Image: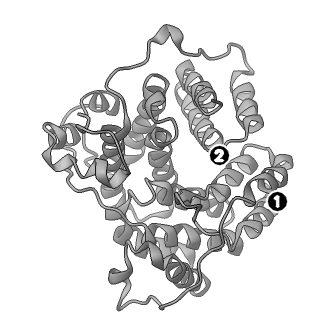
Amino acid sequence: MSSGILNEAYERLQGTGPEWGESRLTNHGPMAVEVLVRRGHEDDVHRWVDAYVSRLDDLPSARRPIGDANWREALGDGDRVGDWAEYFTRQVAERPWREVLAAWWPRLLPGILAGTTHAVIRVGHAVRTLLVDERNAVAAAELAQGLAFWGARSLSMPLTAEPGGDLDPGEAMENVPRVPSQDGPVRARLGQLPGLSGWTGAVAALRPALTPDDVPVRLEALVDAATLRYLTHGHASPVILVHTATAPNAVLHTLPALPRELWVPSLSAIWAACAGVQAAFEPVQAAPRDGLPVAPAGPDALHDVMEAAVAHGDEHVIKFTDTAAEVFTRTGHPDALAAAIRVRLLLSR
């Protein structure tokens, strides 16, 4: 990975807020450029940033300092994102980034739905950079922005349960019920979960991780299942549903930077969040398989699908295709690449 080009992109995006526009859309710039560089598309980075950065808003100014004594009252207060950014920027400047992450991960984990999981995804992309280049101060500053977004937009599940069943992720996802009204913002949709028949049982049906050693393979299986499921179910909400795959993938790649005692609760939290997104946004009926794309054949299939995603340019297409490429590499399942083609087609309309 070329940290020079990535750092230049991070620096160009510093000072932009985590959200933009009246609809508070998420700033995906730092996440997408990390994928572009890691996937060998350094030459496309500045052109992509040129096209993307003009839509972004500035990071709001800090107003009231956040500290050890008052951080709880600021948790989930979107108006204080500037305060959170100032706090975490100071933290990563004064302490090793791993210490900051280890201290704050369990505090933020209950609100992992922040930004419809965009916050944990942004943190995950920054951590991937730092695991390659531990002393990268620019990447540590980007981690601070991701943590700030998470703190400001912290959103907890209204009702959940601990995994304790015997189902693999693909089977568990089949049993997730849907909220009665898949309409309105995420809070309104998730607010229906406490009255949803079968909800807690569906979350509890997942086979648990009994030890930290079980967690990576469980997360891989969750990412695999969500990626393949997008092919048949992504059409109802093409943007939101990509996060059922990219969010657990972000947690998976953050694990090496976390204390092992945080691994099992991380799996429980992200599974519940993904199931919640599925209940709130996924259609009951799968799309007919004969009308869906198929993966290209041949040794260049993965390369060609990734190239097409970069050429398309949409940030969700780039990030989901990156995850789908990992799934294909890990499993060899062609539907992982077909799902990447599917998201590109859905977001080309």
Query: What amino acid type is highlighted by mark number 1?
Result: Ile
| Residue shown at 52% from the left, 57% from the top | 23
Q: Nearer the viewer, residue 128 or 172?
A: 172
Image quadrant holding the C terminus, namely top right
| Residue shown at 33% from the left, 83% from the top | 73
Query: Residue 135, how many percent across, how many down?
Result: 68, 73
Q: Nearer the viewer, mark 1 or mark 2?
A: 2
Q: Which residue is mark 1?
A: 5
Classify 68 as above or below 333: below
Tell me if I can see residue 128 in this picture: yes
Q: Quadrant of residue 31?
A: bottom right
Which circle's residue, 1 or 2, is located before the other in the chain?
Answer: 1
Classify 247 as above or below 338: below
Query: Residue 124, how many percent across, how many down?
Result: 54, 57
- Tell how many labels: 2
Q: Is residue 198 left or right of residue 208?
A: left
Secondary structure beneath label 2: helix
Query: What amino acid type is highlighted by mark number 2?
Result: Glu
Classify 271 as above or below 63: above
Tell me if I can see residue 268 in this picture: no
Query: Residue 271, how many percent across, how many down?
Result: 33, 46
Q: Nearer the viewer, residue 251 or 153?
A: 153
Q: Is residue 173 left or right of residue 161?
A: right
Residue 60, which numbered label? none
Q: Which residue is mark 2?
A: 315
CA distance separating discs 1 and 2: 18 Å
Q: Label 2: how many residues lie within 10 Å, few (<14), some (14-19) or many (20+)?
A: many
The reply to whether dot 1 and dot 2 touch (C-beta < 8 Å) is: no
Query: Residue 99, how many percent across, how many down?
Result: 49, 77
Secondary structure beneath label 1: helix
